Amino acid sequence: VQLQASGGGLVQAGGSLRLPCAVAGRTARDYDMGWYRQAPGKEREFVNAISWSGTNTVYADSVKGRFTISRDNAKNMVYLQMNSLKPEDTATYYCAARVADTRGITHFDSGGIDYWGKGTQVTVSS
């Protein structure tokens, strides 16, 4: 499975960005999907996740109410809509996939991720 995230860039605080992630090699329906991010000098942190069907989502407190994860299984795509961006959202954002099973997405831990995409840089200026 290959994951290709794009859409990063430079945006002013308060602005918006949408990051698409294309899933190739297998059908996206086989995977719970999510986003992580890593800022310079910091550990990679969980952003959000969505179940294989799109029915369930979970968010980190830091992005709740501002970011939205969605998916279109027919197009093998996952999306991260980021609104009301803050300078502390500056990071490299990574798309992640985990084989869908009975675990659910409540604990979408980095150690359980099966596939990582190459990151896309998001920079929010103050």
Image (cartoon, rainbow, N blue to C red):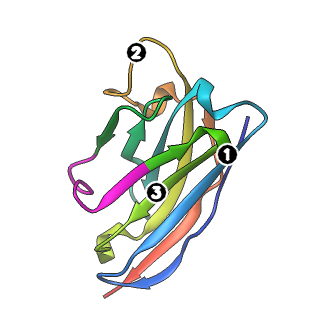
Judged left or right of residue 100, residue 105 is: left
Q: Which residue is mark 3?
A: 80
Q: Hey, which residue is sitting farthest front in the picture?
A: 74
The residue tagged with tag 3: helix, strand or loop?
strand
Earlier sequence position, callout 3 versus callout 2: 3
In the displayed structure, 117 sits above or below 115; it is: below
Q: Which mark is residue 125?
A: none
Q: Is residue 47 left or right of residue 97?
A: left
Q: Residue shown at 37%/45% (left/top)?
A: 48
Q: Quadrant of residue 2?
A: top right
Q: Residue at x 32, y 77 (%)?
A: 87
With respect to residue 42, does 59 lie above or below? above
Disc with the residue nearer the chain's start (1 vs 2) = 1
Q: Residue 76: x percent and y percent?
A: 66, 42
Label 1 CA crowd tier, 10 Å (few <14, some 14–19, many 20+): few
Residue 120, compared with residue 69, is above or below; it is below
Looking at the rendered structure, the kind of residue marked 3 is: Leu
On the rendered structure, is 48 left or right of 112? left
Query: Magenta segment: does it hold 67?
Result: yes
Q: Residue at x 23, y 56 (%)?
A: 62
Give percent across and percent down for residue 12: 37, 87
Q: Residue at x 49, y 14 (%)?
A: 101
- Residues shaded magenta: 60-69
| Residue pointed to by mark 1 | 75
Specify whether residue 43 is in view.
no
Graded by Cα atoms within 10 Å as few (under 14), some (14 to 19) or many (20 or more), the crowding at tag 2 reads: few
Q: Earlier in the sequence, mark 1 or mark 3?
A: 1
Q: Residues within 10 Å of mark 3 (few under 14, many from 20)?
A: many
Instruction: Tell me the residue that label 2 is attached to.
Output: 103
